Image (spheres, helix red, strand yellow):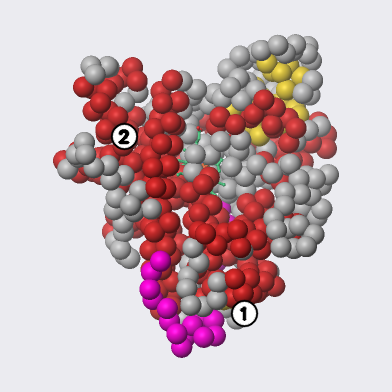
């Protein structure tokens, strides 16, 4: 492709034989912060060894875009690790699958199915509004008591992906939903953590607590996916496509009718299950996490909350609920969502990429097989790009007049970029906008008296989650007198 690789290796952390530059021996900091700090000593781009794997850490947006966009195809690989192999039956999903024709095919299939929903009779907008409405009803019942909103937010978001994937939904207290909450947290806590087994696969033969939890949780998840799959097979029809699982089943049947081997095109039962598992898992954990961060920042910054409410009152009023068409009219809310995604990126290290051939980044050579970690945290907290990066300020995404959006820096990639860019970006943005606007139109979120504000540090895992906290959702003036109950 015309590039001339330089002949220099990037600066490298000192490494010991076998263990490499094992992070947990060197620091208590979460990896995104540790990698950001190492820039002071090694520069923006440096490498380290994890066991026998060479890892390149990218901390600025120029290099990140070179990896993700300019050389996106060269760096489109994914590493295989013990934990992700357990979760995805050896990479038969999308997110943790290495670059292959099967991966490309499934990505396209899911993309097509998600787009179709935009136009279908039951549009994504209607599904989200239905859940937003039911969530607001539940919040109305919790008046003046301190509650952890996480379960209700999770249920609302889960029901949106449930409708998309399985054409089903969960009621409050549903046993299957409760078990999903548990297994999913277990998976988030243990998968892709660069724990020791991922660095030294031979450690699997010894008892390991994390791995035991992961196996247990994956097995419960797989039973749930299998059940949905069997139910769908029973009432599948070529004529009506109800959801993503139907779309995948249709592709499988059509390849069987054409006598192509389902193994060759990656349409085995395993592939189908792992693909819906990915969308279901990504759909729930990411959006819920951003909603939890948003509310945490709103109670820390009541002036931001008031400003969003003023905007809602002026542009929408109280006679109807917000809809997607209002997005262009509510720049301050959009700016707040952008700022939350900047200051606490869901996936601060993205998912590791792998160089599929010898290549280069900046002036340095990179060998085939090198794992590349894009430190989104460094991009989003780069002092050369953002004034006071730790300050929560939605205003930085507004133009000078304050009535339109702007992108103050190119060092911002909350959904990644290039051929591995997030598949759910459009869906996630619709959900964040609708859920937050519905909640803030009707409620003010406050801290219960005497309680400390939510901790904003974040717990590192496959997604960066806030610690648990409780808030009061107080009905705003007028809403008590005129509870609006029509659905959009
Ligand atoms: C991948 C962010 C919501 C499905 C990713 C990546 C990021 C990301 C950073 C990794 C990109 C890379 O490795 O280069 C987010 C954020 C979300 C969100 C911030 C919410 C605000 C969703 C939703 C879905 C989804 C709702 C499902 C419908 C996926 C999938 C991948 C992915 C399937 C893997 C793509 C691939 O490897 O080819 N997302 N995501 N995401 N996301 Fe999202
Ligand atoms: C979340 C827990 C689920 O039980 C399984 C699952 C599947 C897909 C993963 C998701 C988890 C975490 C967030 C991930 C997503 C694929 C893309 C997304 C990693 C582990 C992000 C943010 O990159």
Write the start and end of the magenta stretch as one range.
465-488
Disc 1 marks which residue?
Answer: 450
User: How far apart in space, not on screen, are marks 1 and 2 (Cα)?
Assistant: 51 Å
Neighbour tally class for label 1: few under 14, some 14-19, many 20 plus, Cα within 10 Å = few
First in sequence, mark 1 or 2: give its number. Answer: 2
- x and y percentages locating residue 216 in the rendered image: 35, 42
In front: 206, or 411? Answer: 411
Asked whether residue 282 is in view, the answer is yes
Tell me residue 333's x, y (percent): 62, 63
Q: Quadrant of residue 367?
A: top right
The answer to whether the beta carbon of the residue marked 2 is less than 8 Å from any atom of ligand 1 is no
User: Where is residue 13 drawn, in percent x and y?
Assistant: 75, 27
Q: Residues within 10 Å of mark 2 (few under 14, many from 20)?
A: many
- Who's the residue at 68% across and 16% down the image? 359
Q: Which residue is mark 2?
A: 248
Res 486 label? none
Q: Say if the magenta span includes residue 476.
A: yes
């Amino acid at each position: 492709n015309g590039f001339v690789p330089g002949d220099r290796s990037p600066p490298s952390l000192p490494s010991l034989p076998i263990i490499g530059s094992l992070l947990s021996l060197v620091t208590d900091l979460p990896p995104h912060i540790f990698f950001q700090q190492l820039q002071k000593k090694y520069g923006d781009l440096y490498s380290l060894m994890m066991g026998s794997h060479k890892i390149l850490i990218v901390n600025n947006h120029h290099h990140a875009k070179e990896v993700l966009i300019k050389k996106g195809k060269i760096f489109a690989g994914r590493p295989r690790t013990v934990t992700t192999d357990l979760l995805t039956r050896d990479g038969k999903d999308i997110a943790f699958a290495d670059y292959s024709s099967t991966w490309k095919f499934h990505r396209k299939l899911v993309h097509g199915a998600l787009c179709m929903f935009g136009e279908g009779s039951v549009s994504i907008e209607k599904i989200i509004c239905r859940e937003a409405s039911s969530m607001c009803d539940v919040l109305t019942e919790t008046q003046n008591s301190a509650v952890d909103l996480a379960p209700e937010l999770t249920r609302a978001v889960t029901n949106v992906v449930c409708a998309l994937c399985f054409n089903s939904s969960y009621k409050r207290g549903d046993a299957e939903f409760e078990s999903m909450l548990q297994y999913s947290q277990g998976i988030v806590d243990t998968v892709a953590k660069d724990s020791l087994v991922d660095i030294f696969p031979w450690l699997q033969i010894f008892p390991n607590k994390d791995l035991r939890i992961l196996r247990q949780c994956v097995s419960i998840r797989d039973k749930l996916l299998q059940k949905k799959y069997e139910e769908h097979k029973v009432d599948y029809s070529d004529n009506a496509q109800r959801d993503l699982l139907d779309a995948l089943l249709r592709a499988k049947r059509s390849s069987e009718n054409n006598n192509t081997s389902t193994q060759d095109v990656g349409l085995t039962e395993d592939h189908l299950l792992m693909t819906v598992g990915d969308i279901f898992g990504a759909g729930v954990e990411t959006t819920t996490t951003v909603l939890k961060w948003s509310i945490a920042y709103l109670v820390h910054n009541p002036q931001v909350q008031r400003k969003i409410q003023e905007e809602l009152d002026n542009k929408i009023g109280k006679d109807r609920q917000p809809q997607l068409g209002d997005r262009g009219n509510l720049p301050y809310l959009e700016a707040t969502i952008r700022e939350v995604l900047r200051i606490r990126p869901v996936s601060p290290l993205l998912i590791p990429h792998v160089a599929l051939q010898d290549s280069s980044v900046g002036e340095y050579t990179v060998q085939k097989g090198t794992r590349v970690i894009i430190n989104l945290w460094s991009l989003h907290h780069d002092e050369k790009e953002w004034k006071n990066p730790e300050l929560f300020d939605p205003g930085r995404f507004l133009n000078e007049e304050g009535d339109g959006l702007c992108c103050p820096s190119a060092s911002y990639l909350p959904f990644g970029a290039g051929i591995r860019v997030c598949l759910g970006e459009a869906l996630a943005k619709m959900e964040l906008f609708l859920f937050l606007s519905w909640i803030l139109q009707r409620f003010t979120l406050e801290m219960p008296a005497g309680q400390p504000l939510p901790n904003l540090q974040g717990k590192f895992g496959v997604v960066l989650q806030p610690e648990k906290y409780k808030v009061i959702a107080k009905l705003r003036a007028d809403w008590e007198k005129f509870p609006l109950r029509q659905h959009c």
